[in-house]
Image: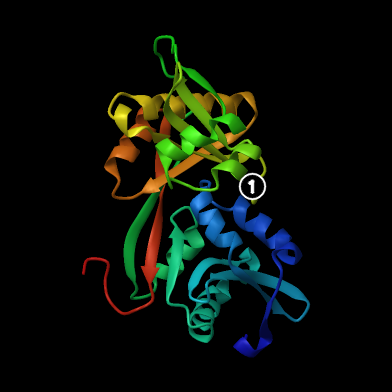
Amino acid sequence: MSQKEFTISASPIADLRHLVDEYIVQLSSPIDSFLEDHILGSSFYIIRSHADDVGYFAIHNSQRLTQFYIRHAWRMHAQSLFARVIDEYAVKCLFVPTCDEGLVSLVIDQDYVIKKQAYFFQDSRLELAGGSDQNEFRLAAASDLPVIEQVCVDFIGDYAKRIERGEIFVYCKGSELLGIGVFEKSKLVEGLGSIGMFTNETYRRQGIGKAIIVALRGWCKEHGVNPVSGCWYYNEASKKTLESAGMVTKTRLLHVEVISGTADE
């Protein structure tokens, strides 16, 4: 089939939600809020052959491909369509989660530079043994805002709005803020939420981060939410904290540059 048989047009995500849902189902593991935010901030395009929906893709800031999905029945055209999108839309780089087998394979076909960006974690479902925690873990209230801003500074920002949305938890010993937990409900996947934490610098290396993640896992379980998380690939401390708190990783996020070269350079 000639490439002329395929048309590409801009589309709001709402009009291709059926394709997005298909894409999510075929992932081997979930993605976290970092990648989701880039996806939702992208411009979406649908690929059609006459009346048939073939697939879609998304581009962030006119240069980074964040999604590329071709339906199973049209997979024999995936390589040529991918090359067309890269060329016609002047794609300079991609975010590629390794749970997306189709996109990983298309990238491997090319002489692109592949760099490791992040780890994606999911819940191990293991209950962690331990003593009773005498510290307080609760949803943040508006009255907590000043101390959160003082301790966490610009860790994530928009603290007031996040508190209103029920996304911030505080972990305290008496009146002292030991750290905060963060929960972000997925906008793409029902029942999925990203969790994270920040530890007061005064209390680093005392197991505070682990305690917060364990508490967030428990909160998610009580509320029927599947927790996921992520950290920068080279942040070994965060990786160890998440793993000690019962999160496990089998997925990486790759930053791919559309230039000739090898991953070893």
Of the pair 25 and 220, the residue shown nearer to us: 220
237 horizontally vs 31: left or right: left
The quadrant of the rendering that contains the N terminus is: bottom right
Question: SS of the residue at dot 1?
Answer: loop
Q: Give coordinates of residue 220: x percent, y percent.
A: 58, 29
Residue at image coords 27%, 66%: 263
User: Residue 8 appears in which quarter of the rendering?
Assistant: bottom right
Along the line of sight, the residue nearer the viewer: 178 or 241: 178
Viewer-closest of 264 and 176:
176
Above or below, 84 against 166 in this view is: below
Residue 17 can be seen, yes or no: yes
Q: Is residue 13 left or right of residue 111?
A: right
Quick one: which residue is furthest to the right in this view? 51
Q: Kindly identify the residue that appears in the image at 39 percent across and 13 percent down.
A: 130
**Residue 7: x and y, percent?**
68, 83
Which residue is painted at 41% across and 36% down in the image?
151
Read off the residue under disc 1.
Answer: 189
Q: Is residue 123 visible?
A: no
Q: Nearer the viewer, residue 262 or 231?
A: 231
Give the left or right position of residue 47, taking residue 103 as reference: right
Q: How many callouts does the rendering have?
A: 1
Q: 124 above or below 51? A: above
Residue 196's x, y, as percent? 46, 38
The C terminus lies in quadrant: bottom left
Task: Tell me the kind of residue under disc 1.
Answer: Val
Characterize the local packing of mark 1: few (<14), some (14-19) or many (20 or more) Cα atoms within 10 angstroms: some
Location of residue 13 by image quarter:
bottom right
From the top left corner, tell me how far across and down residue 191 is, in percent: 65, 39
Q: Is residue 162 left or right of residue 244?
A: right
Q: Is residue 15 above or below residue 261?
A: above
